[in-house]
Amino acid sequence: MAGPHHRLEFEKPIAELEAKVEQLEAQDDHSADAREELRLLKRELVELRKEVYGNLEPWQTVQVARHQDRPMTTDYIDLIFEEFVELHGDKLFGDDRAIRTGFAKLDGRKVMFVGHQKGKTLKERTACHYGCAHPEGYRKAMGKMRMAEKYGMPVICFIDTPGAYPGIGAEERGQAQVIAENMLEMSRLRTPLVCVVIGEGGSGGALGIGVGDRVAMLEHAYYSVISPEGCAGILWKSGSYAEQAASALKMTSKDLLGFGVVDDVIAEPIGGAHRDHRQMGARLKMYLSRTVQSLVDIPVDDLIERRYEKFRVMGVYVEAAAASE
């Protein structure tokens, strides 16, 4: 993919250097001095991207995770899977476009795919509710996972949502209940489950398809009990404190790997996944192929026991008496 059209505030120094590189390339000067200057500028650009993206603040990470050019679920479907046959509906209410499900092939292996979709155009985003799923979306997801269990297919889930849809209709149709049911059913599903946070991992909307044998996230994704704006609204009564909330929530990939909330962090191309969709897709495909292969070799009863223990130990801590003065 070509360079992104949208620049984040902290990317301005990168954009300025990129403009210089483009200007030199456009001059079509083949002299030795010009070639050397271009080479040095390109090296400087790579180093600047590494420095900036290697030291992102939590709020900057949130901005990258929400970048309008960041690859979405449908992009990865095209980049990773050889075939994809979409399945629709929850057999109860309707077909939620915020969650896409279907049969797919990963390196020749049949899998069941489930993933949030935000949409790219305004029309798509409206239809997908910006990736905020309704109860029928989570019921659709679980129905397809049960089908995968029946036919012995591994399940791959891509998480990219600011949270489950908070509207009255969603609550009337059992939003909280269906998310809780999904978490319970996923915890005992008798087939391998791999979950990857590809962008935003917000609240129960993420957990509704987020219980897996392996839970990974992309380097510049975030995974949190609540969005920074939501947290700021509760603690400081104003969304303007979102930056402080992002730091307090400890929701970056580095934090969560250290806490044991996620098992793996998948490195993004220098400058973020939005700069190179193909490279990010190749890295993600490699991770999925390797991980699925390792899980299918584990006996199902052992798989479920390990999955249970994995989530059971999260949040465990030891209280120690304060040292006597």
Image (spheres, rainbow, N blue to C red):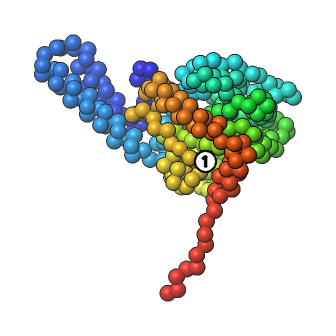
Residue 75 visible in image: no
Question: 295 or 76, which lies in front?
Answer: 295
For badge 1, the amino acid type reads Ser
- In the image, residue 228 sits, relative to residue 92, either above or below, namely below
Q: Which residue is mark 1?
A: 224
Q: In the picture, residue 204 is in which quadrant?
A: top right
Quadrant hosting residue 98: top right
235 sits left or right of 165 in the view = left
Residue 181 position in % (x across, y down)? 80, 43
Local SS, label 1? strand
The crowding category of the residue bearing disc 1, from other C-alpha atoms within 10 Å (few below 14, some 14 to 19, many at least 20), is: many
Residue at 51%, 42% (x, y): give it: 265
Q: Quadrant of residue 11?
A: top left
Please tell me which residue is depicted at 80% across the width and 24% down the height of the picture: 89
Residue at the (54%, 21%) spot, across then down:
79
- Quadrant location, the N terminus: top left
Note whether 66 is above or below 256 in the view shown.
above
Q: Number of callouts in the render?
A: 1
Residue depicted at 53% across the width and 29% down the height = 285
